[in-house]
Image (cartoon, grey):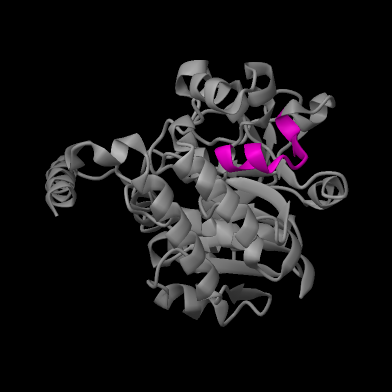
Amino acid sequence: MSSFGIYTLANDAVYDQLVALLNSIEVNVSPDIPVCIIPYDERLEQVKQELQGRPNVTLFNNWDSIQRWDNFVNKVWMAHPRSKQSKFSRPPWYGGYVHRKFASFDGSFERFVFYDADSLAMKPIDDIYQKLDDYDFVFNDWEHAKPRAVTEVDISATEQMMNLKESEIRPKLHCDSFIGSKQGIFGAKELEMLEERLIQKKEVECIRAWWSSSGLFSYMTLPIGRPMFNFTLSSNSQERTGNCADADPFVNINNVLYNQEGKKTIHRIHYMNYSSIDFARLCKGEDVDIRYKDIFLHYRFLKQPEQKPQQLKKASSLTKMSRKTQKVINKIKRTLF
């Protein structure tokens, strides 16, 4: 058992992003910190091959834990009001396994930090380790600042069903892309309690976004009642930074990104809302519309500079049209079958 480590969730579909993340952790966090990859599914051929050259990186193999979370999440979403709606209204991520990241709480690290695979680490995480002396959850995101109408936890429903005020709810809203926490917080008793509240007491209706692991996790930390800290709510302005590639302005200094305002250090850049397919195309030399793609390519090919694309080229109009057509066909197939 290790006292501290890093988790991420991955499979072969996000191989390029995984390699970039692992390289950024090695350079900007520590080359010695243990990293454990939780399988999104069983497509792991490339991942396993990559691990052969990384002695500090392992594959999470507690499938009992993964099954436990699968069972819990499936029961919860089946109780959600949207589960009774037409299958044509299902979100693109319906039936996915993003929730398997919560197996981090069953892993071997007593304290851990979880990074989504579509992230790059930009600085050491000693500050998170220290925060875990006083808090059980540490976050660094801006979910709490979203307009009331678009928070993944429905504030109005939560006020009514959990008898909480908005001022009590907002500081506890967060996402699940970057988590500092501890082993064993969500044991059998905790999941049983949550299942009863979500299903029997219908508190699942507090979660606006159906099949959203982020919305579910944000809810789950409310009844647990454990102390949490969010860097974006820190009294120290130097700790309040952006993190989203598609929204926040950053400055690149020696292949490390800093918050543009005040040149503040950031924990990570999160490439949310960009698909793994786009990153795969980028790594093959296509000029894909991804912000901060240069720094991604730097870390992706850090150990294989000879394979890094020397020049990026735009996809042809014919290729773009073919992709749009295939995307429509795939969506129809997912909806029907």
At which x and y percent is residue 200? 46, 42
Q: Is residue 328 left or right of residue 264?
A: left
Q: Is residue 269 left or right of residue 154?
A: right
Q: Residue at left 45%, top 36%?
A: 202
Residue found at the very far front of the displayed protein: 200
Residue found at the very far bottom of the displayed protein: 52
Q: How many marks?
A: 0
Please state which of residues 23 and 336 is positioned toward the viewer in this rendering. 336
In the image, is residue 224 part of the stretch drawn in magenta? Answer: yes
Q: Residue at left 50%, top 65%?
A: 68
From this view, report whether residue 251 is shown above or below residue 92. above
At which x and y percent is residue 49? 48, 80
Please state which of residues 143 and 201 is positioned toward the viewer in this rendering. 201
At which x and y percent is residue 292? 52, 40
From this view, report whether residue 58 is shown above or below residue 3. below
Q: Residue at left 69%, top 22%?
A: 168
Q: Picture quarter containing residue 186?
A: bottom right
Q: Is residue 79 left or right of residue 17?
A: left
Quadrant of the drawing holding the N terminus:
bottom right
At which x and y percent is residue 135? 81, 44
Quadrant of the drawing holding the C terminus:
bottom left
**Residue 271 is at least partly visible in this image:** no
In the image, is residue 266 part of the stretch drawn in magenta? Answer: no
| Highlighted magenta segment, given as a residue range | 219-232
Q: Picture quarter containing residue 110?
A: bottom right
